[in-house]
Amino acid sequence: PYHYVPTEWICILFLVLYSISTVLHLGQAVKYRLWWMIPTATFAGILEILGWSARLWSSRNPKLLTPYEMQIVGTIIAPTPLVAANFIILGRVITQIGPQYSRLTPRLYTIVFCCFDIVCLIVQAVGGASAAHAANTKTSASMVCTSSHNLQGANIMLGGIAAQLFAIVVYVALAAETLLRFQYNLPFRHVEQRHISEKGPRTVSKNLRLMLCGMAFCTLCIFIRSVYRTVELADGWNGPVITTERYFDWLDGGMVTLAIYTLNFFYSGILVKKDNPLTHASQQSIDEEASSTKT
């Protein structure tokens, strides 16, 4: 069904990498009590383990349809919870730099984007299940019907991934606007807070800069993967993109691996939870006021 036989050592490599990252995410979630990381990043890792275990199974039994169906569903929907983790982290970042700089409140940001992400997850799961069911229908009398259902499943998955791409673009645009408003102290709404009226460029702390860089890289990797999947599904089940293994290995497996490990290394429990980017700026202003009073 793949039009190729998945390479065994590549499947083992990704299986090991995803297993390590998933265990790390679970341990980090428990250590820092960030329970929302379990249904997001940890769950994404579990889905990738499922998908690549199925591909490893296919590498040894390439004609079986069951592992093919499993990997369709697993690898299609796995990055979606990872996107949700980025949405939640951005809400926490906005809480720290000041919700007055964002068009949406941190809570509304999380609710809107995560709900949309859940819808995308459901759509992709339905599409993947439909395509898997079509692949499992093998009788000659239903060949035309199978082809139609297979195409229908691909179109449903394509719609889910395209919607996710749209959400990522909006997410990046809103995040960029929020950071620019913070940097130049141009609040979107008025909030009673000391030093909020001060004009001029502002900067975030080192920890928060690291978190933002990690989020940007993670989002870029998922975006590249989503573009690849969109092209793949739009090209059809027998197109040159979906039938070339190295495209899948690099642009799906590789990109999601980089994304999920980025959230391991740039962990929000370390870089966001314990950090207040306004502390240094506020302290500097207090010192300046004290100096002027003495003089």
Image: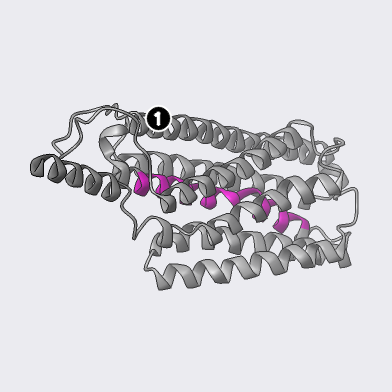
**34, above or below 114, in the image:** below
Which residue is found at the position 34% from the left and 34% from the top?
A: 182
Give residue 97's quadrant in the image: top left
Residue 173 visible in image? yes
Along the viewing direction, whichever of 242 and 259 lies nearer the viewer: 259
Which residue is found at the position 83% from the left and 38% from the top?
A: 241
**291, above or below 24, in the image:** above
Along the viewing direction, whichever of 265 and 42 lies nearer the viewer: 265
**273, above or below 222, in the image:** below
Q: Is residue 237 toward the left or the right of residue 18 in the image?
A: right
Q: What SS does tag 1 mark?
A: helix
Give residue 46's quadrant in the image: bottom right
Along the viewing direction, whichever of 174 and 156 lies nearer the viewer: 174
Q: Which residues are magenta?
A: 68-93
Q: Is residue 80 magenta?
A: yes
Which residue is found at the position 13% from the left and 36% from the top?
A: 192
Q: Where is residue 40 drawn, in percent x and y?
A: 49, 56
